[in-house]
Every structure is written in structure tokens, then in C-alpha cells.
Amino acid sequence: MGEPAISIRNLTKRYPTVAALDDFSLTIPTGTIYGLVGPNGAGKSTLIKTIVGALRPTSGSVSVLGHDPLDDRWILRRRIGYMPQENALYEDLTAAQNVRFFGAAHMSGDDLDEAVARALAFVELSDRADSPVHTLSGGMRQRVSLACALVHPLDVAILDEPTSGVDPELRRAFWDRFRSLSGAGATVIVSTHQVSEVVECDRVALISSGHLLLDATPHDLLARSATTIRVWQRDGTVRDHNADDYRTELPSILHADVERVELVQEPLEDVLLHLIEEAR
Amino acid sequence: MSGHTLAVTARVMRQIRGDRRFAAAMIIIPVLLLVFLKVVFDAMDVPSVGQQRYAVLGVSYVIHFVAFLLTALVVVGERVQGTLVRMFINGYRRLEIVGGYLGAYTLFATLQSVLVLIVAHFLFSLDYSMGELGQIFLVLWLLAILMMSIGILVSNLARNVAQVIPFVPAIVVPALFLSGIVVEVSKLPTWAQVVSRVIPLYYSTQVFGSLFSSGSIFDDLWAFLLLPILAVVVLGFAAMTLREEL
């Protein structure tokens, strides 16, 4: 296994009244789509802002592509793309002018022209390139913001709730794009509080109250979900049986009065909620 | 000027052009203020010679606070909407950002100064030679740059737009009373004379004083030089104090 894209050791970020991150450690492998999952206020944005060097940690260390985000900021800023939670766009400028301005920090001339056109095509906004941002819908603004983050060649894309407030169709398109970025070798870090998106990631970190509760693959998480044998009897009653004990339960379950049997998987959302509740 | 600075300047210029209401207000308001000044002069029967001098000082006062207002809300506005942090993370540096703002607003302030001076020339029937008008423009232009630099610095220090508001009267009002426009600084108490030295308008008023008495702004060379020197110092300080971190 090569060098991790991001390595976080014992990171603490303390504000006067609260610790947003508390002794947080995490390793993010290169080339993965890594989900930061947790409820609002879990510390996801604080973690992201610390990774991109916008926040100074109280203690602990962060290494991005082998560099310190604060000491080596000028090396790193050429290699990372950052999409903040708020759109952070210039409303009076057009979509293309916004993308061009942030791209101009990395390139110029024909390279910049091509990169702007490519980024807008990537988010399927080429036809609205010359529309002022204030005339675009919320979803379109999200797409412009994503284009601004991905306009330059990058090794790590750090995206803070990019699918928040985005309709399901566009959300699907976003994840396809993240997958194509990852396929090209980039590490993609995506924060989300939408549990349904967990399965889109290669790995996820479950964060709550500034603590890392779990670092696992979606498959690992699904394996944690309980399975129930749901039995419909002819008299109309429905009974749930623990599937773990099916060897002992099955003879008593399967009798003449049974009309239908179904295996019911515990939703992923419930698995994550249980983990968060257990941590509390 | 680096490519990054030019990119910031070009972006701000596009924004000013796009926000026509703001651009129009910043051009029309100084002209309106000059019209009000003329009305007051006429009502007070200020003699023509006095009007020639006070019109220039009035123009300098208007340029002084409009230039400050131009930039005072800029940085804090970008910080609040998140674009400042985004600029930094994309690789724009502090001096490039501050220089870019100043580049754009200097172009705007130049246009504003020329227009205000032309209006003043006709409104007050100014009897200055082209050379003298050129010198007046140079002082107004340097004063505008200094005040824009102060605006950027104040904007840096604020965490939100509301925190900028108290600075507006704190900078604009003492300048009127203590800069030498209303009353000669030498007639003020010692403490007020000391305070006047930190007011940019004091130096421009001194320079205009030498223009009125000897026909050249360079007679009080030190006061003249202090305008660009202070602008560079304040701009450097503004760049140093621009916070990259949240």
C-alpha cells in the first residue's frame, strides 16, 4: 500500500465553549472516494477546513500528500481542489467568469480557456456558461461551485456537503463525476449527512461530536445490520424473528399456518444511528 | 503586477461593471455633494476667491470619504460570503489580493476624480490653469489611493459588515474638523494638532495650501510625499493583517 493521501493524528480543535474535534485520528488511502458521514455539527466541516489549511488545529497533526496544510500551503494549494459548504461564488459574475477566476490561480491563456470549458462541461453547465450566477437555481450554483473546485489538475478533491440541497437526479450525476475523478487517480473526500450516499463511497468515517466512531467500508457497515425473518401467518398476524437464530427458530417458524416469509435487512441509517447512540 | 493580481483586478472590475447601481451611486453621489456645496457657498455669499479654494478642499473631502467607503466593505464582504477563503485555498496570496482590489478601485477612483474635478471646474467656474488642475488631480488621486488602502485595512479588521459601520463616522467626521479645511490646524489645541497628523486629509489640505499660496503643490514637498508613502505603508499593513485562516 502506498503513501496515504491524508494522515490525521490526534487532531483536536477546541473553541472557547466546545471541542469541535477531539483527539481525532484517521488515514485516507490514495485514490479512494472517502465519505465523512455524521449529523450536523459532528465536526465534518471543521475537519475539512483543517485539512485544507483554513483552520489551525489546537493540537495534533495533519499531513496531506506528505505536507503540512499550513507550513506547506503553497505546495498543497496547487494540488487540491476545495468546495466549501456555502457556494462562495460571485453572484454578479457569470458561471464561466467564476470558474475562470478560480482557475486563473493555477493557469493562464489557452490552458485556462480549455480548463474552464472542460469544468463547465463536467458539471453539464456549458449552455449556461454566460448566465450570471444570481440567475441560476440552487442546484446549478452547486454545480458552478463544483466546477470552481475541479477546474485545475488536482490530486485531492475535498468537497464539503456537495450534494446538500441537490435533487436525486443531479446527486446521481455528482457521484458519477466523483467516481470518474477517483478513476483518474485522485482522492475524493466528500462530507455528507445523507446516509443513502454512504454506499457510493469506497470507505466512510462516521463522525459524531468530534469523535471518529467508525472507519469502514460500506460493505462492513451493511454486515453490521441485523436481518429479521418476517413471517406472515394465514390468520393475518405478522411476527419478526431474529435471523441470527434461524437454525433453532426455523422449525417453529415454518408450519402450516405460514403464508409468506421475508428476510428484512435493517436500514443502513438505523445502523449508523445505533452507532451514534451507543457512542453517546 | 503579477498575473494573480491582474486576475483579481479584472474580476473586481467586472463586478463593478455588473453592479451598475453601485457604480452609478459612486459617481452621482460625489457630484450631488458638490452641487450642495455650491448651493451653500452661494447662500453664504462666499466671495469668488474663497469659492476657488474651498471648492478644491470640498472636492478633496468628498473624494476622501467616498474612496474610503469604496473599499471598506470589500474584504469583510468576501470573508462573509466565503470567497476570501476560497481565493486563498486556490493559491491567491495576500499581497496579490490586496493589490488586485487596489488596482480595480484605483481605476474606478481615477474616473471618479476626473469627473468630479470636471464638474467642480464648471460648477464653481474654477480659474486654474491646466497645469494647476493637473496638480490638483494628482493630489486627489493619491488621497483616494491612501483612503482606499485605509478602507481595505479597516475591512480586514472586521469580522462582519456591522463592525465596519462605526469606523465610517470615526474616520470621516474628525477629518472635517481637524484637517484644516474648516479651521486652521495651528489654531487648534495641541492635542487636536497631534490628532490631525494621523488624518490623511490634513496632508492633502497642506499641499493644497501651498498650491494656493505659491502655485505649486511641491512647495510642501514633505506633505505631498507623505500621501504615497502612507498609502504604501497602510497597504503593506493591510496585506500583513489579511487573515488567511478562519
Image (tube, rainbow, N blue to C red):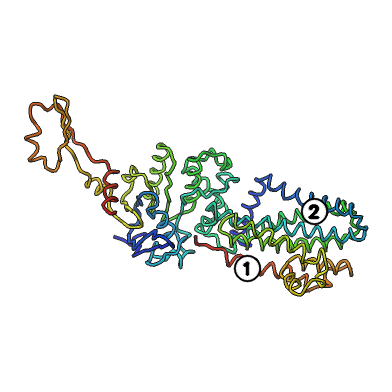
The reply to whether the C-beta atoms of the residues labelled 1 and 2 are less than 8 Å apart is: no
Indicate whether B116 appears above or below A8: above
Going by the numbered disc 1, the residue's amino acid type is: Gly
Q: Quadrant of the C terminus of chain A?
A: bottom left
Q: Which mark is residue B60?
A: none
Q: Earlier in the sequence, mark 1 or mark 2?
A: 2
Q: Could you confirm whether marks 1 and 2 are on the same chain? A: yes
Q: Is residue A62 in view? A: yes
Indicate the amino acid at tag 2: Val
**Residue A97 appears at what percent x and percent y?**
58, 47
Q: On what subunit does the disc labeled 2 rest?
A: B
In the rendered image, which residue does mark 1 sit on? Answer: B236
Query: CA–CA distance between discs 1 and 2?
Result: 29 Å
Image x and y of residue B124, in percent: 88, 54
Q: Is residue A188 visible?
A: no
Residue A167 falls in which quadrant of the image?
A: top left
Q: Report the residue at 72% width, 46% height from top.
A: B24
On the image, the x and y values in percent for residue B13 come to 66, 51
Residue of label 2: B116
* Residue B141 against residue A166 in the figure, above or below: below
> Furthest residue to the top?
A235
Characterize the local packing of mark 1: few (<14), some (14-19) or many (20 or more) Cα atoms within 10 angstroms: some
Q: Disc 1 on helix, strand or loop?
A: helix
